[in-house]
Amino acid sequence: MISGVVTMVILLIVCTALVYPLAHVTRPASLGVVYLLGVLVIASIWGLWLGILTSLLSAAAFNFFHLPPVGRFTIANNSNWVALITFLVVAVIVSVISELARHRAEEAQQRRAEADLTADMAQLVLSHAGLEESLGLVGQRLAAVFGLRWAEVSLDETASEGGRRLAIPLLTRGQPAASLFVPADLPAATLGRLRRAAAPALAAILTSALERERLVAEAVQTEGLRRSEAVKTAVLRAVSHDLRSPVTAMIAAGAAIRAPDVSAAEREELGAAVQEEGSRLARLIDDLLDLSKLEAQAASPQLAECSIEEVIEAALALQPPGAPFEVRVDPDLPLVRADFVQLERALANLLENATRYAAGSATVVRARRQGDRVSVRVVDGGAGIAPAEQERIFEPFYRAESGTDRTAHAGSGLGLAVARGFVEVNGGRIWVESAPGQGSAFVIELPAVGPAGGQS
Ligand code: ADP
């Protein structure tokens, strides 16, 4: 508004100055038209009231500076009166017409913004992954286009309006599916436009977004069922082979041990074989149970602050005596918040694999802090794993084709799947870094709790 007043003063001065040279060419009484330029500019940019004020001040300036007697507000003859009044009437009409044109232009602009808003809202809602999150942005866009202090879209159709918020229901298939909340003190015209233009468009967009979410959920469920079917088939296959072979070996050893001509040394050997096959069976059953719990999302961790150093010690204690492990733990390693037993199981599986697939080379277990996380690396000097298999080995029942000689190491392909399951339910990550022929580093990373030194 201030800029309007300043422009008005400048235009009045310019128009007044412009009339002086023109007065030599024609009668001053007919030069009031020069002031109409200023009136036109002011009315079309700043509206009717400033336009009328400009008309009045122009009439005064025209009279004072150009209509005889000059330098006074009086007027000498009647024809000048006619000129002045005609000027004033024309100036006011010009103001009114400019105001109307300005109003039309503003309305057209608003309609265009509203039409663009529909496209914007559709883009925000349909291209965003999370519907809830995109609704926040839709609220902001709506508020900007309709000049509201705020606007909120809520999928909770039971959310009620309060003293200062008004709810516009958004209907999908005739049922309220969401609400648009706006300030209660909105002008009736804005509220009408919101109800007529924005609400139906937004409701239609939400209908397709909700439909899409439903279809995605259905697809995920179908995929889940397909996967659990695949897991069941794989379990049956593993059960028929992996469970059967230790049992067959144990039955055979049991029968042989009872034969009358068995020497003490042979008995010793058969006893060791029964024990070894028995523990292989026990491990397999443990892995199967753990995996089925993880698949059923029933492996909820008992979270507590634990020391990674103690987890490493416990996992090492589960390894066969004499296995070559070198442990390096950073001093002042922070604690992690996790289920001690689940972490111990995950790490024990990695240590066991290192012993089985990298026999002969020492395995290094390295624990250190990495920013706000703690990592444990199990590094072996074994055959390594081909890049194409580095993700697949974490799938249940998958056993790598490359590097290791599968037939030489009995296994069911469950150890890493269980390790990944346990690490992830505890909020961590597990992966392998490896190159064929150069060994493997299996890494577990977990969020650290509190500062280094073990205080939380
Ligand atoms: P399993 O050892 O019973 O086969 P895992 O899930 O523990 O099952 O391992 C899956 C596969 O990953 C193994 O069959 C093996 O091919 C590969 N693998 C695991 N650990 C190592 C390792 N340290 N070095 C080389 N290959 C490994």
Image (cartoon, rainbow, N blue to C red):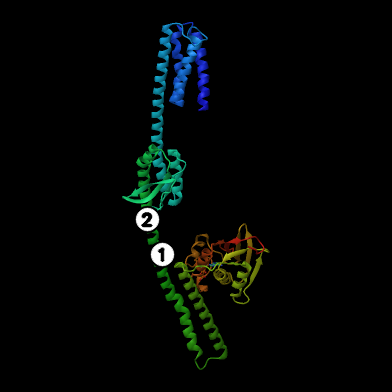
Of badges 1 and 2, nearer the viewer stands 2
In this view, the residue farthest toward the front is 74
Spatial CA span between label 1 and label 2: 20 Å
Question: Residue 238 occupies which quadrant of the picture?
Answer: bottom left
Of all residues shown, which one is farthest toward the bottom?
Answer: 260
Horizontally, residue 171 falls left or right of residue 136, namely left
Query: Can you give x and y, in whole percent of width and height, for residue 449 in the image?
Result: 60, 61
Ligand 1 closer than 8 Å to label 1 CB: no
Where is residue 144 shown, x and y percent of the image? Answer: 45, 39
Q: Earlier in the sequence, mark 1 or mark 2?
A: 2
User: Where does label 1 land, which residue?
Assistant: 227
| Neighbour tally class for label 2: few under 14, some 14-19, many 20 plus, Cα within 10 Å | few
Q: Is residue 455 left or right of residue 49?
A: right
Tag 2 residue: 214
> Does residue 129 appear in this view?
no
Amino acid found under the numbered disc labelled 1: Arg
Element type at marker 1?
A: helix
Residue appearing at x 37%, y 55% in the figure: 214
Q: Residue at x 38, y 38 (%)?
A: 188
Asked if the residue at label 2 sits under 8 Å from ligand 1, the reply is no
> Amino acid type of disc 2?
Arg
Q: Which quarter of the image is occupied by the C terminus? A: bottom right
* Residue 168 in picture, x, y percent from top left: 38, 46
Query: How many marks can you see?
Result: 2
Left/right of residue 344 with respect to residue 23 in the rendered view: right
